């Protein structure tokens, strides 16, 4: 009986350690499995060279995104802990390797806890400006 109890205790401890390790894995894998239609992947950002894009994009980010994604795009905003899905880290190479079209699609249509912004930011040009600002987190 003591052997069985010891065996069960060891199993519980191993399970606890595995779950603890999983909790500290980076959330960058959140982007995996988020299928973006091909037509969006190849879209060029029409606002990439607009001189006002960075400033307007930052204003939109502060208004709509910062509460979850954080001031510096690390996914550590005050509302992030309340979400069931990780916010992701905009500074990672995995995030920054996405095309502007992929970021535009994800911002427009959302998924899970990430809301769609096609109504809150109804102007396509403004969502493209937001993408311009998201690129600044790579620096």
Image (spheres, grey):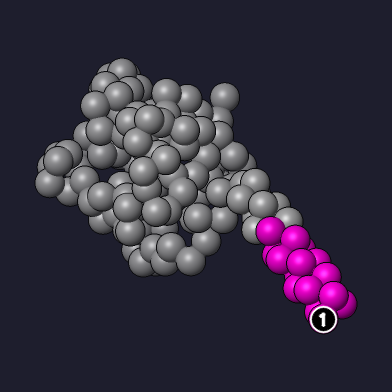
Residue 56 appears in the rendering: yes
Could you tell me which residue is drawn at 36 percent across and 66 percent down? 37
* Residue 18 visible within the image: no
Task: Give the magenta range.
Answer: 1-16
Q: Is residue 10 magenta?
A: yes
Which residue occupies the foreground of this view, 88 or 5? 5
Left or right, 24 with respect to 131, comes to: right
Query: In the rendered image of this protein, does residue 50 appear above or below residue 112?
Result: above
Q: Which residue sits furthest front? A: 1
> Residue 116, how many percent across, how many down?
23, 51
Question: Could you say where residue 56 lies in the image, as x and y percent from the top left?
Answer: 26, 22
Q: Quadrant of residue 49?
A: top left
Residue 103 in the image, given as x and y percentages of width and height:
39, 47
Task: Name the quadrant containing residue 7.
Answer: bottom right
| Location of residue 32 with respect to 43 vertically, above or below | below
Q: Nearer the viewer, residue 52 or 116?
A: 116
Which residue is most to the right? Answer: 3
Residue at x 69% of width, y 59% of height: 16
Looking at the rendered structure, the secondary structure element under dot 1 is loop
Q: Is residue 53 left or right of residue 99?
A: left
Disc 1 target residue: 1
| Residue at left offset 70%, top offset 52% | 21
Q: Position of residue 86 (x, y in %)?
A: 46, 49
Is disc 1 surrounded by few (<14), some (14 to 19) or many (20+) residues within 10 Å? few
Q: Is residue 48 above or below residue 14?
A: above
> Is residue 18 shown left or right of residue 90?
right
User: Looking at the figure, which quarter contains the C terminus?
Assistant: top right
Question: Which is the main secondary structure of the residues drawn in magenta?
Answer: helix
Name which residue lies at 21% across and 37% down: 125
- Look at the image and tell me in which quarter the N terminus lies: bottom right
């Amino acid at each position: 009986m003591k052997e069985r109890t010891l065996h069960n205790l060891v199993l519980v401890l191993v399970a606890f350690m595995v779950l603890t390790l999983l909790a500290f894995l980076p959330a960058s894998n959140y982007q995996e499995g988020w299928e973006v239609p091909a037509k969006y992947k190849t879209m060029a950002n029409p606002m990439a060279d607009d001189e006002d894009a960075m400033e307007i994009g930052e204003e939109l980010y502060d208004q709509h995104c910062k509460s979850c994604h954080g001031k510096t795009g690390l996914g550590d905003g005050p509302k992030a802990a309340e979400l069931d899905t990780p916010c992701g880290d905009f500074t990672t190479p995995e995030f920054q390797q996405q095309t502007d079209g992929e970021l535009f699609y994800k911002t427009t249509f959302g998924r899970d806890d990430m809301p769609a912004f096609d109504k809150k930011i109804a102007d396509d040009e403004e969502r493209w400006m937001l993408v311009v600002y998201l690129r600044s987190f790579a620096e």
